[in-house]
């Protein structure tokens, strides 16, 4: 997700997603078509370079033979995104992690909030919709007993449905 956003910001995503379409053998290209093809090849080389820089060395060895940035991206996607069955299993594990998530004794609000958001973002990344209000409610019911009075205060004074995650974190940090 981060790499995709980065590539989109550099305007390389289209070449990664669609690849470079080589003209059929024997096709004569105009000068403008040749320039366009060369520009796409250059974009592809730049995209490949960014991908190579972002990938760990052991994994890099497995994709060095790939011709285009699209080939690299597709290979990485197959290796790490997995099949539908794998995705479903990962999502189940993440749901369980979210459901059983509790603040640990002595844990700071910032650390607990970060753990909660990490799991929530992974769930979202796997394609499941999880509303902010669901996360807010989860955080409020899974804090340590030390925060019981804060939870009561928040529930009585604020509309939980309209409470943003940032507002919740701020309110909890004030009472830490």
Image (tube, grey):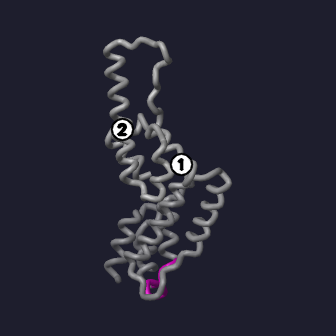
- Assess whether residue 145 is covered by the magenta stretch: yes
Query: Observer-nearest residue: 113 or 87?
Result: 87
Query: Observer-nearest residue: 176 or 24?
Result: 24
> Could you tell me if the residues under marks 1 and 2 are in contact, i.e. CB atoms within 8 Å?
no
**Residue picked out by circle 1:** 77
Q: Is residue 108 left or right of residue 130?
A: left
Asked where in the image residue 37 lies, by quadrant, the reply is top left
Which of the two discs, 1 and 2, labels the residue nearer the N terminus? Answer: 2
Q: Is residue 63 above or below residue 155?
A: above
Asked where in the image residue 20 lies, by quadrant, the reply is top left
Q: Is residue 127 left or right of residue 40?
A: right
Task: Give the crowd class for mark 2: few <14, some 14-19, many >=20 residues within 10 Å.
Answer: some
Q: Position of residue 27 (x, y in %)?
A: 46, 13
Q: Which mark is residue 120?
A: none
- Name the residue furthest right: 85
Q: Is residue 154 above or below residue 91?
A: below
Find the distance from the CA under tag 1 to the CA under tag 2. 19 Å
Q: Is residue 112 left or right of residue 36?
A: right
Q: Which mark is residue 45?
A: 2
The span shown in magenta is 142-148
Query: Observer-nearest residue: 61 or 152?
Result: 61
Residue drawn at (46%, 38%) of the image:
67
Q: Is residue 82 left or right of residue 113?
A: right
Asked where in the image residue 172 lies, by quadrant, the reply is bottom left
Dot 2 falls on a residue whose secondary structure is: helix
Q: Position of residue 96 (x, y in %)?
A: 61, 69
């Amino acid at each position: 997700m981060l790499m995709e956003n980065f590539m989109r910001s550099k305007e390389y995503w289209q070449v990664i997603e669609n690849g470079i379409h080589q003209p059929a053998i024997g096709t004569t290209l105009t000068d403008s078509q040749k320039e366009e093809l060369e520009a796409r090849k250059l974009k592809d080389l730049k995209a490949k370079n960014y991908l190579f820089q972002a990938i760990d060395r052991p994994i890099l060895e497995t994709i060095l033979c790939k011709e285009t940035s699209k080939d690299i991206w597709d290979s990485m996607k197959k290796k790490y995104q997995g099949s539908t069955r794998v995705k479903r299993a990962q999502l189940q594990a993440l749901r369980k992690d979210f459901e059983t998530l509790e603040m640990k004794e002595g844990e700071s609000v910032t650390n607990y909030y970060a753990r909660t958001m990490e799991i929530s973002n992974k769930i979202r990344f796997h394609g499941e919709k999880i509303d902010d209000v669901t996360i807010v409610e989860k955080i409020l019911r899974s804090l340590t007993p030390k925060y019981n009075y804060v939870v009561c205060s928040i529930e009585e004074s604020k509309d939980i449905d309209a409470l943003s995650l940032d507002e919740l974190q701020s309110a909890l940090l004030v009472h830490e």
